[in-house]
Image: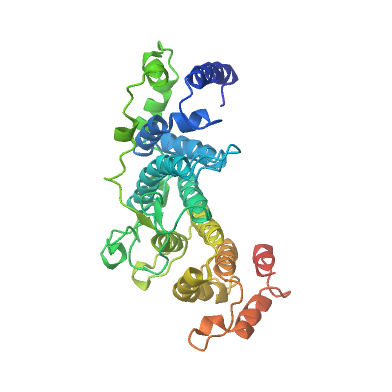
């Protein structure tokens, strides 16, 4: 994208390849080229996410984000030619297989790696893919074969279905005395690998020709997602919450909200807010609200002007967004959850709307 000349060449190759693929139309009418070669795109992007180069990971996230906005990593829209139920189901299964593999890879990368430059794109992409599938009503919530994410929002201890991930002990992403500046600088060997990409080499298009022309491509083998675990909606919400907020007293760290990782913390909370808005199901939101309201309100109640609290105004504002997104239509005091008392919530938000609150980001969020 930065090199216009190279970009125009690749665009020409893409357009010509697409015209060849459309000549051998076997699938539903008006299927986009990205969907036709989705197994191959998935394989390449998963490989990029597993790279040690942070630039490659970020580039993979941007490509995934583009696939989301083109409605590829999402349930297939109904055709104007009225596809049969089985045709539509097969397209959804085709898309869900890739989405499941990608979601599993993204979530594993979130929980297993330290904060690196561009990890904000990873949490944003993960939430976008999950949100696409959570927001669609045309996919049955009980059909696990078609859903790349479990819609059960009541299993708070599972990151993946039946894994009890949150009950186990895991290494903290940022050690209490860790050198954040060191973790945020790309290694020299990665830079060298990046430079090598720009060297002029002969491009072999034979593999691409095989993809477009061969009728023997084993897409089913490439789309086999049996080895990928099914991410849970509640588990993804919880991991984004814990990536954005310092909740556990055992993990207290003075560097948790440092300037080096602040954008990542804020991005994690923004991703959580997006994910909660994508699935406005009162039953599940009620369960999630019960679990998340406590730590969110603790952060919101803190004084951003107090140096002892050490919580940036941006984090408080994003916590407010998450709290608002987790509320459902008709929320009211149920006598069991103290966080559903409307009068207390109103007082909390009014506190941050007044003139004593000097941070405009918090004022805007509370309003």
Is residue 227 positioned above or below 297 on the image? above
Q: Nearer the viewer, residue 310 or 364?
A: 364
To which quarter of the image does residue 218 belong?
top left
Residue 293, image x, y percentages? 50, 74
- The outermost residue toward the right is 355
Res 308 visible: no
**15 vs 128: above or below:** above
Residue at (53% x, 55% y) in the render: 135
The quadrant the C terminus occupies is bottom right
User: Which sits in the foreground, 110 or 153?
Assistant: 153
Image quadrant in which you'd find residue 342: bottom right
Image spot of residue 91 (x, y percent): 45, 40
Mark yes or no: residue 180 visible: yes
298 shown above or below 228: below
The residue positioned farthest toward the bottom in the image shown: 335
- Left or right: 153 as drawn, with respect to 276: left
| Residue located 42% across and 31% down the image | 41
Quarter of the picture holding the N terminus: top right
Q: Specify the color scheme.
A: rainbow
The image position of residue 58, as x and y in percent, is 46, 38
Viewer-side residue, 154 vs 11: 154
Q: Is residue 336 above or below residue 304?
A: below
Residue drawn where x is 44% and y is 35% of the image: 55
The residue at 39%/21% (across/down) is 211
Number of numbered labels in the structure image? 0
- Identify which residue, 316 or 331, lies in the foreground: 331
Residue 351 location in percent, x, y? 66, 78
């Amino acid at each position: 994208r930065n090199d216009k000349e190279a970009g125009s060449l690749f665009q020409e190759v893409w357009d010509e390849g697409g015209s060849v693929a459309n000549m051998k139309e076997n699938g539903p009418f008006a299927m986009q080229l990205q969907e036709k070669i989705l197994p191959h795109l998935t394989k390449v992007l998963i490989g990029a996410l597993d790279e040690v180069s942070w630039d490659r990971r970020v580039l993979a996230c941007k490509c995934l984000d583009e696939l989301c906005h083109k409605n590829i990593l999402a349930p297939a829209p109904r055709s104007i030619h009225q596809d049969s139920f089985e045709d539509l189901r097969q397209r959804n299964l085709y898309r869900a297989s890739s989405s499941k593999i990608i979601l599993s890879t993204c979530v594993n990368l979130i929980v297993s790696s330290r904060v690196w430059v561009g990890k904000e794109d990873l949490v944003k992409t993960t939430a976008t893919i999950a949100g696409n599938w959570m927001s669609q009503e045309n996919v049955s919530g009980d059909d696990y074969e078609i859903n790349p994410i479990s819609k059960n929002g009541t299993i708070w201890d599972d990151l993946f279905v039946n894994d009890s991930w949150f009950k186990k002990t895991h290494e903290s992403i940022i050690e209490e005395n860790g050198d954040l500046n060191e973790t945020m600088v790309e290694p020299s060997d990665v830079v060298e690998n990046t430079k090598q990409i720009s060297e002029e080499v002969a491009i072999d298009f034979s593999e691409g020709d095989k993809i477009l022309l061969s009728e023997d491509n084993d897409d089913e083998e490439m789309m086999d997602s049996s080895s990928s675990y099914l991410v849970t909606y509640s588990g993804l919400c919880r991991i984004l919450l814990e990536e954005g907020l310092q909740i556990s007293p055992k993990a207290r760290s003075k560097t948790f909200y440092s300037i080096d990782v602040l954008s990542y913390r804020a991005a994690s909370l923004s991703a959580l807010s997006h994910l909660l808005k994508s699935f406005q199901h009162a039953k599940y939101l009620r369960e999630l609200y019960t679990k998340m309201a406590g730590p969110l309100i603790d952060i919101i109640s803190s004084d951003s002007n107090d140096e002892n609290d050490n919580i940036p105004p941006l984090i408080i504002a994003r916590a407010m967004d998450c709290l608002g997104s987790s509320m459902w239509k008709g929320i009211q005091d149920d006598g069991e959850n103290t966080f559903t008392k409307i009068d207390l919530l109103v007082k909390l938000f009014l506190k941050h709307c007044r003139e004593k609150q000097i941070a405009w980001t918090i004022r805007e969020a509370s309003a």
